[in-house]
Image: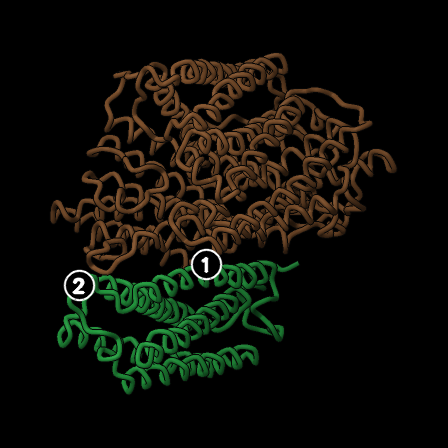
C-alpha cells in the first residue's frame, strides 16, 4: 500500500505514472467525461453560430466573406496545432521520467499558446476597429464572439493551468501526485486544439466560401 | 463497536465539520436539508397558485406576483428541490451499494453541493432585490429578454452556478461507479438504483452544458448587450427554445430514472423477490436515456417546424413508452407471487405504478403532434407533467426518504405517520391533478393569473385546490414524523427492512470509512445471497489494511461563495459601478481558492490497521 512519501517520491516511477494510483485513474477517466460535456458546450455554440451567421436584422454589418482574412487565421492555426504537438513531446518525456525535457516542451507549448492568444486579440481588435464587427452590433457578432471567445477563454485558462503546474512543481520533479495533473492539462490542450480545427473549418473556411 | 464513550461534539465543531466535509454520507445530509428546504418553498409557492385559482376572478394575489410565484415554483422544484434530493440519495446510497469507501472525487462532491446551495440562494434573493423572474420556468425569449426587473438575471446566474455543481456531481458519480466497484461487483450485478444513478449522471453530463450555453446567451443578451434572441438585430428566439429543451427533456429523465431506481429497490425488497427481468430493466433504462436526447422538439410542436420534423419527434417520443412499459410490467411481475409487506416505502411504490402509468399515457397523447396543437399550453399539459414529475419523482423521493432514513440517520420513520402521509398526499395529488386534465380539455390555458366565472371552470378548480391542501397536510405529517423520529425515535437495527443490497450490511451508524474490508460480491443482491447461502455476513475480499481517506476542506465553500458574490456583481453592474468591486472580489475569492487547491498538496490521511483492529475485524 502506498504511503504519502511514495506518492511524492520521484524515484522508480511506473511507465504510466498518470494512471498508477486510484486518484490518477479517477482523474484520467473523469477528465475524459468532462471533455465529453465540453463537446456538448461547443456543439451548442457551433449550432447557434451557424444559425446566426451573417444574420444582421436591421443592423448594418460586414458579411463573413469580406470580414475574415485567411492568412492570419492560417498562421494561428499552424501555431496552435504545433503547440499540441509540442505538448505530446512533453507527455512523451513525462512517461520516460525526463522531467526537464518535459518542462522544456511544455514551455514551448505555453509560448506557442500565448502567441496564438496574442494574434487572436489582434484579430478581434482588427474586426472591431476596421469593420465595427462587435459583440453588441448584431446577432452575427454576438454568435461569433461567443464561439471564438469561449475558445479563446479556454486557451487562456489552459495557459494559466500549465504555468501554475510548472511553477509549482519546478523544483520537486515528477511524482505520482502531479503526473496526473500534467497529463490532464495536456489532454485539455489537445481538446482546445480539436475545437479550433472545427472553428477554422466552420467559421473561417466556410465563412469565406459559404 | 463502542459508542458509549464517544463524546458529543459541540455545535461549532459540528457546523465546521459540515462546512468542510468531503464525506459522501454527510454531503447527502446537506443535500437532503438543502433540497428539503427548497421543496417546502416550492410547495408554498404551489399553494399560493392553487389558492389564487380556487375561485373565479379571485384577487388573493396580484398578477405580477402570480407570474413570479408560478415561475419560481417550477424553477425551484426542478432545479433546487428534485435535483438535490436525487443527489442526496445518490450520495447516501451509491458508494455503499457498490462497496466503495468513498466517491471518486470527494472534493468535487462537496463543491457540487455548495455551488447548488449558493446558486439556489442567489436565485431566491431575487424576491428581496426587485422581484423574482416572471416569464415561466422555461424562460422563453422574449419574455426573459424584455422582462423589466432583474428577475431573469437572477435566474440566469443562479441556475448557472447551481448547474456547474450538478455537472460536477454527475461526473463524480460516473467515475465512482465505473472505477470504484468492489471486487465481484460487475456491471450486471449492480443494484438498479446504482444503474439509474449512473445513467442519470451520463444524462447530466451531456445535457447540462447545453443549459450552460443557453444561460450564457441569456446573460449576454440581458446584461451585456448581445443580440442572440433579438430578431431586429438578427437574433432568433427559437434558438433558446431548442437549447433549453435539448437540456430540458433529458432533465426529465435525469429526475425520473433515479426514482425508478428507488422503486426497483423498494419493490424487490418488500416483495422478498429478486427484481423480475433485471437485465431488461437495465436495458430499458439505457434505452430511455438514449431516446431522451432525441425528443426535445416535442415541446415545440406549435412552433412551426413543419410536418416532417414534428412527425419524427412524435414517433421518437412515442417509442419511449416501450421501455417504460417494460419497466412497469417488470415491477408488477416482481410483486407477483412475492411475499409483499406494505410498509410505507412499498405503499408509495404501489401508488406510483398506476399514477405514473396515467402520466405516461397522457404523455403519448401529447406526443401526437396534430392533437398537441389542442393540448399545448393548457392545463392538460400541466396535469400530464405533474403526473410524471410528482407521481414519478416526488413519490420516488418520499419512498426513498422512508426506505433509506434508517441508513442515513439510523432510525426508522414512524410507520403509522408514514401511512397517513401517503394517504393524504396520494388522494390529494389525484384530486389536484386528475381534474386538471379536464380543465385543460375545456380550454383553460396554463399560467393564467385568474379565470372568469361562467365558463364551467369553477368546480374543477375548486376541487383542485382542495386536493392541494390535502397534499400540504400530507407533507406536514411527513415533517412532523421526521421531527418526532429524530427526537424520540430509537436507533434501528442495521438492516430494518431485511435488505438485499450491500448498504444494509454495514453497521448502524455507518463508519466514516464505510467498509473496513471491501466485500466480495458473489452475485446480484449480494447481501441476500449471503443471507440465504452463507452465514448472513459478507466475505471480505482483502485482508485488513490501512485505509486512505481524503482531508476535509473549506475551499469548496469559498469557491462557491466567490462565484455567488461575482454573480451579484454581474447582475447589478448596469445599475452601479460599485458592482465591479463585487465582481472582482468574488473572482479573487473563487479563483484564489481554486489556485490554493491546485498548488497545495492534499494527500489525505490513513486510518491505521491497528486502530481498525481495535474496533474488531471483519467486513462489518
Q: Secondary structure at mark 2?
A: loop
Q: Name the colour scheme.
A: by chain
Nearer the camera: disc 2 or disc 1: 2
Image quarter (top left, top right, bottom left or bottom right) of the C terminus of chain B = top right
Q: Colour of chain B?
A: brown
For residue B116, above or below residue A145:
above
Q: Position of residue B204 (x, y in %)?
A: 50, 50
Q: CA distance from mark 2 to mark 1?
A: 47 Å
**Point 30% across, 44% down: residue:** B564
Query: Horizontally, is B271 left or right of A86 in the view?
Result: right
Q: Residue A137 has which mark? A: 2
* Residue B199 can be seen, yes or no: yes
**Point 39% across, 78% down: residue:** A201
Query: Horizontally, is B114 left or right of B605 in the view?
Result: left
Chain shown green: that is A
* Residue A111 can be seen, yes or no: no
Q: Position of residue B215 (x, y in %)?
A: 33, 50
Q: Residue furthest right?
A: B533
Query: Which residue position holds label 1?
Result: B601
Q: Residue B8 has which mark? A: none
Q: Secondary structure at mark 1?
A: loop
Q: Quadrant of residue B321?
A: top right
Amino acid at each position: 500500500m502506498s504511503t504519502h512519501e511514495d506518492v511524492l517520491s520521484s524515484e522508480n516511477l511506473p511507465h504510466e505514472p498518470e494512471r498508477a494510483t486510484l486518484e490518477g485513474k479517477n482523474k484520467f477517466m473523469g477528465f475524459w467525461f468532462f471533455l465529453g460535456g465540453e463537446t456538448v458546450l461547443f456543439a451548442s455554440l457551433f449550432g447557434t453560430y451557424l444559425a446566426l451567421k451573417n444574420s444582421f436584422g436591421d443592423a448594418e454589418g460586414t458579411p463573413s466573406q469580406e470580414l475574415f482574412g485567411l492568412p492570419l487565421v492560417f498562421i494561428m492555426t499552424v501555431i496552435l496545432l504545433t503547440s499540441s504537438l509540442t505538448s505530446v513531446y512533453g507527455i512523451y518525456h513525462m512517461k520516460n521520467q525526463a522531467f526537464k525535457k518535459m518542462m522544456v516542451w511544455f514551455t514551448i507549448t505555453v509560448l506557442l499558446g500565448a502567441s496564438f492568444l496574442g494574434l487572436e486579440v489582434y484579430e478581434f481588435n482588427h474586426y472591431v476597429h476596421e469593420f465595427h464587427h462587435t459583440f453588441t452590433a448584431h446577432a452575427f457578432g454576438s454568435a461569433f464572439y461567443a464561439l471564438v471567445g469561449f475558445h479563446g477563454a479556454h486557451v487562456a485558462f489552459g495557459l494559466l493551468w500549465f504555468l501554475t503546474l510548472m511553477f509549482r512543481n519546478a523544483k520537486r520533479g515528477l511524482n505520482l501526485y502531479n503526473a496526473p495533473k500534467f497529463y490532464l492539462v495536456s489532454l485539455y490542450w489537445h481538446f482546445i486544439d480539436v475545437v479550433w480545427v472545427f472553428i477554422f473549418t466552420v467559421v473561417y473556411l466556410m465563412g469565406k466560401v459559404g | 463497536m463502542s459508542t458509549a464513550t464517544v463524546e458529543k461534539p459541540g455545535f461549532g465543531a459540528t457546523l465546521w465539520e459540515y462546512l468542510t466535509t468531503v464525506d459522501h454520507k454527510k454531503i447527502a445530509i446537506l443535500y437532503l436539508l438543502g433540497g428539503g428546504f427548497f421543496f417546502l418553498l416550492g410547495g408554498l409557492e404551489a399553494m399560493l397558485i392553487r389558492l389564487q385559482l380556487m375561485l373565479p376572478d379571485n384577487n388573493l394575489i396580484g398578477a405580477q406576483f402570480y407570474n413570479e410565484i408560478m415561475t419560481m415554483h417550477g424553477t425551484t422544484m426542478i432545479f433546487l428541490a428534485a435535483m438535490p434530493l436525487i443527489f442526496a440519495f445518490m450520495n447516501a446510497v451509491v458508494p455503499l451499494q457498490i462497496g466503495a469507501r468513498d466517491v471518486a472525487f470527494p472534493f468535487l462532491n462537496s463543491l457540487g453541493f455548495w455551488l447548488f446551495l449558493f446558486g439556489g440562494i442567489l436565485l431566491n434573493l431575487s424576491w428581496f432585490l426587485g422581484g423574482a423572474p416572471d416569464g415561466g420556468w422555461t424562460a422563453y425569449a422574449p419574455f426573459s429578454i424584455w422582462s423589466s426587473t432583474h428577475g431573469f438575471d437572477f435566474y440566469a446566474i443562479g441556475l448557472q452556478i447551481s448547474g456547474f455543481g450538478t455537472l460536477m456531481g454527475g461526473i463524480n458519480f460516473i467515475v465512482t461507479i465505473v472505477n470504484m466497484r468492489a471486487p465481484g461487483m460487475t456491471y450486471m450485478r449492480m443494484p438498479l438504483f446504482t444503474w439509474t444513478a449512473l445513467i442519470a449522471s451520463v444524462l447530466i453530463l451531456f445535457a447540462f452544458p447545453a443549459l450552460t450555453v443557453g444561460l450564457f446567451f441569456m446573460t449576454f443578451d440581458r446584461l451585456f448587450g448581445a443580440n442572440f434572441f433579438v430578431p431586429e438585430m438578427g437574433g432568433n428566439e427559437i434558438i433558446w427554445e431548442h437549447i433549453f429543451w435539448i437540456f430540458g427533456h433529458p432533465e426529465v429523465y435525469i429526475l425520473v430514472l433515479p426514482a425508478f431506481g428507488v422503486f426497483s429497490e423498494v419493490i424487490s425488497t418488500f416483495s422478498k423477490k429478486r427484481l423480475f427481468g433485471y437485465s431488461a430493466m437495465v436495458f430499458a433504462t439505457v434505452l430511455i436515456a438514449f431516446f431522451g436526447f432525441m425528443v426535445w422538439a416535442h415541446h415545440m410542436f406549435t412552433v412551426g417546424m413543419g410536418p416532417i420534423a414534428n412527425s419524427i419527434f412524435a414517433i421518437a417520443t412515442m417509442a419511449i413508452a416501450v421501455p417504460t412499459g417494460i419497466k412497469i410490467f417488470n415491477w408488477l411481475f416482481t410483486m407477483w407471487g412475492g411475499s409483499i409487506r406494505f410498509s410505507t416505502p412499498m405503499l408509495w411504490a404501489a401508488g406510483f405504478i398506476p399514477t405514473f402509468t396515467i402520466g405516461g399515457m397522457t404523455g403519448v397523447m401529447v406526443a401526437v403532434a396534430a392533437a398537441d396543437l389542442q393540448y399545448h399550453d393548457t392545463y392538460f399539459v400541466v396535469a400530464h407533467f405533474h403526473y410524471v414529475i410528482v407521481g414519478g419523482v416526488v413519490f420516488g423521493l418520499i419512498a426513498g426518504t422512508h426506505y433509506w432514513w434508517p441508513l442515513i440517520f439510523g432510525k426508522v420513520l414512524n410507520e403509522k405517520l408514514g401511512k397517513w402521509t401517503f394517504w393524504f398526499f396520494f388522494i390529494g395529488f389525484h384530486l389536484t391533478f386528475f381534474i386538471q386534465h379536464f380543465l385543460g380539455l375545456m380550454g383553460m390555458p396554463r399560467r393564467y393569473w385568474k379565470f372568469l366565472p361562467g365558463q364551467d371552470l369553477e368546480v374543477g378548480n375548486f376541487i383542485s385546490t382542495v386536493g392541494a391542501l390535502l397534499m400540504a397536510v400530507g407533507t406536514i405529517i411527513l415533517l412532523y414524523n421526521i421531527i418526532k423520529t429524530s427526537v424520540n425515535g430509537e436507533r434501528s437495527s442495521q438492516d430494518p427492512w431485511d435488505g438485499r443490497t450491500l448498504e444494509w450490511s454495514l453497521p448502524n451508524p455507518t463508519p466514516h470509512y464505510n467498509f473496513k474490508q471491501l466485500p466480495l460480491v458473489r452475485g446480484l443482491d449480494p447481501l441476500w445471497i449471503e443471507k440465504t447461502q452463507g452465514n448472513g455476513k459478507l466475505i471480505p475480499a482483502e485482508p485488513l489494511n490501512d485505509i486512505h481517506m481524503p482531508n476535509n476542506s473549506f475551499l469548496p465553500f469559498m469557491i462557491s461563495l466567490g462565484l455567488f458574490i461575482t454573480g451579484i456583481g454581474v447582475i447589478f453592474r448596469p445599475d452601479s459601478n460599485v458592482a465591479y468591486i463585487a465582481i472582482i472580489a468574488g473572482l479573487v475569492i473563487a479563483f484564489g481558492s481554486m489556485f490554493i487547491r491546485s498548488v497545495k498538496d492534499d494527500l489525505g490521511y490513513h486510518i491505521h490497521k491497528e486502530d481498525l483492529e481495535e474496533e474488531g475485524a471483519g467486513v462489518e
